[in-house]
Amino acid sequence: MRINKYLAECGVASRRGCDKLIADGKVTINGKPAALGDDVTEGKDEVLVNGEAVQLNARHQYYLMNKPKGYICSVHDERGRKTVIDLLPAGAGRVYPVGRLDYDTEGMLILTDDGDLAFRLTHPKNEIPKTYLVKIEGSISDAALNQLRAGIELDGRLTNKSKVKVIETDKKYTKLHVTINEGRNRQVRRMFESIGKEVTFLKRIKIGDMGLGSLERGKVRKLTAEEIFYLTNL
Ligand code: URA
């Protein structure tokens, strides 16, 4: 495998970032400085970056799912409802969803067995931005938009500031993009409830700057090494 691809798959940096590391002389193969076009064989060649050995991400599994509504974000449901695990391909291993989307919420969901990544993405102190497409009935006032942006009291505590943008509206409905950096229970739905609006459609469309691309509703694919790198460094 080409050295820059190998390093990216090991999660060292993006492919371009790896090119720079190689050009800067930070990478060695079997003790010799690596050059941009070099090839390496996993398990045969010793690859070091800044003197440290790198390993493929093969120890863990990472999936991206476009969750449909009607599935619960859990490994098992006592009430026998369908879970997101039911949508994984056979042999996916013991991965679990990172964070939760409600039963009725759709969109971007990461599933992995990498506990460190799951912890990083969900720990409130990391304030990872998550963007939702929200649909409500009717219109929304500027005052209500500003309230949502400034913070809404939920469970006796203000939510963090959020980004809220109307993207489409007519007399019957309004669609918005809402970016929050916490993951409180049913947060988006409850923020809108508290300004008197029921959310009629909710879909997570981004985690950080990463979106679903062309992944169709109900479909799952493996994350690429660059996506794993991006999420690990968010
Ligand atoms: N906010 C919600 O209300 N529901 C979700 O599933 C995610 C965020």
Image (tube, rainbow, N blue to C red):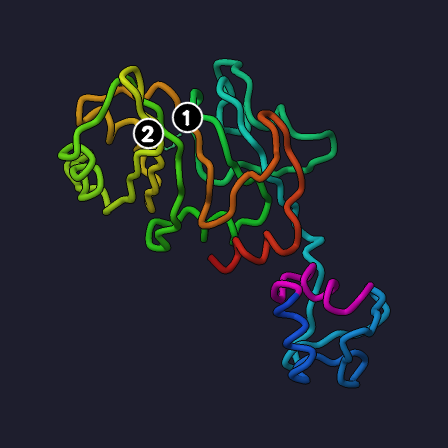
Q: Is residue 136 left or right of residue 57?
A: left
Q: Which residues are magenta?
A: 1-15
Along the line of sight, the residue nearer the viewer: 130 or 127: 130
| Mark 1 vs ligand 1: CB below 8 Å | yes
The numbered disc on residue 186 is: 2
Location of mark 1 (residue): 102
- The kind of residue tagged 2 is Arg
Q: Residue at x 79, y 78 (%)?
A: 29
Could you say whether the residue bearing mark 2 is in a helix, strand or loop?
A: loop
Q: Position of residue 147 (x, y in %)?
A: 16, 37
Is 100 magenta? The answer is no
Q: In this picture, is 37 found above or below 179?
A: below
| Residue 221 percent location from the top left of the image | 66, 37
Q: Residue at x 27, y 44 (%)?
A: 162
Mark 1 residue type: Asp
Residue extending furthest toward the front: 170
Residue at the image point whose x is 39% and y is 35% from the top: 132
